[in-house]
Image (cartoon, rainbow, N blue to C red):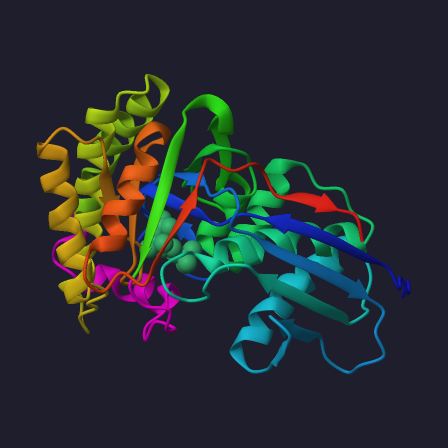
Amino acid sequence: MVMTNNSASAISHPNIAFIKYWGNKNEKIRIPKNNSISMNLDGLETRTRVTFGIDNEADQLVLNGEEIDGEGRERVSRLLDQVRITAGISDKAKVESTNNFPTGSGIASSASAFAALSLAASAAAGLSPNIKELSKLARTGSGSACRSVPAGFVEWFAGQTHEDSFAASIAPADHWDLVDCIAVVSQEHKATGSTGGHAIAGTSPLQEGRVADAQRRLDLCREAILSKDFKAFAEITELDSTMMHAVMMTSTPSLYYWQAETLRIMQAVQNWRMDGLQACFTIDAGPNVHVICPAEHSAQVAELLTKLPGVQKVLSAKPGGPTKLIPE
Ligand code: PMV
């Protein structure tokens, strides 16, 4: 046994998917049913420090200053176990993590959490994985975390096995000046997390159709991003989000992530677009609405959103960079 007593810190951004991941071919190692496409969110961040070699029987997890036990800590331990096996160490670790955005309300905190954890833990254990290896490792903690590893606009190639399911950048962060204006209507932790949701996706009679049509939507979205065609991007992004929510609402048990405010914002955004404002919505597993627009319209979109009933605040994020190490 090699004792390390080393620590490392990493920073990662959450990401918003334009073509969504919902449902797995392999639940255990999170091999998804379909590819997905996303953008990292600059300014929103998880900072994680991992220290191996602590004098404790179990790994320790401190999230936003609060000690976490139970399933949350076990999920972190399972990822640390993989790093320990690769590095040939057996030390327990202390993981200290902070988010600068609300946890558990559809702003993908698990994505940045597991991406930052994967890099900090690997570096603390003396490993230096490349982007592909890191993306695969992050995926096992939370599927969408694999997309927070590479920079900018990212595609997750579903693959069939652990070896070929990973994400890669399709365009750098400065490729397209988009802004995600996140209308926060709730900061509460969601009742059913995405892990439970993925497991029941197949119970919806709509899931098969959503997956069968995924390649078409992926091609349209990727092409719209590469050619910066906002109209095409808006149409396919809204369609994909609503198809995922249709699956959620028609699964057993049914999952309704939308609140009344959520639908009101969706309708407002579509009306603004009909009036010529370039903006579109997408929603993850929570009630908050991500309104995507070109940077030149973001001040107006944020102001309009703030005036809608039930909108507590609006967070704005530009395309973000990759997961990276930061000085201790
Ligand atoms: O990575 P997970 O298990 O948190 O799943 C993410 C699911 C969605 O956010 C709803 C969609 C996506 O592709 O990010």
- Residue 229 falls in image quadrant: top left
Total tally of numbered discs in the picture: 0
Which of the two residues, 319 or 56, is positioned nearer the viewer here?
319
**Rendering quadrant holding ligand 1:** bottom left
Q: Is residue 246 left or right of residue 233?
A: left
- Report the residue at 45% width, 37% height from top: 318
Residue at 34 percent across and 28 percent down: it is 296
Left of 224 or right of it: where is 163?
Answer: right
The magenta region covers 185-208
**In the image, what residue occupies the spot 91% across and 62% down?**
2
- Tell me if residue 172 can be seen: no
Residue 285 higher or lower than 92, as above or below: above
| Residue 287 is covered by the magenta coloring | no
Q: Is residue 90 visible?
A: yes
Residue 255, position in %: x, y?
A: 21, 68
Residue furthest top as drawn: 227
Q: Position of residue 122 (x, y in %)?
A: 73, 52
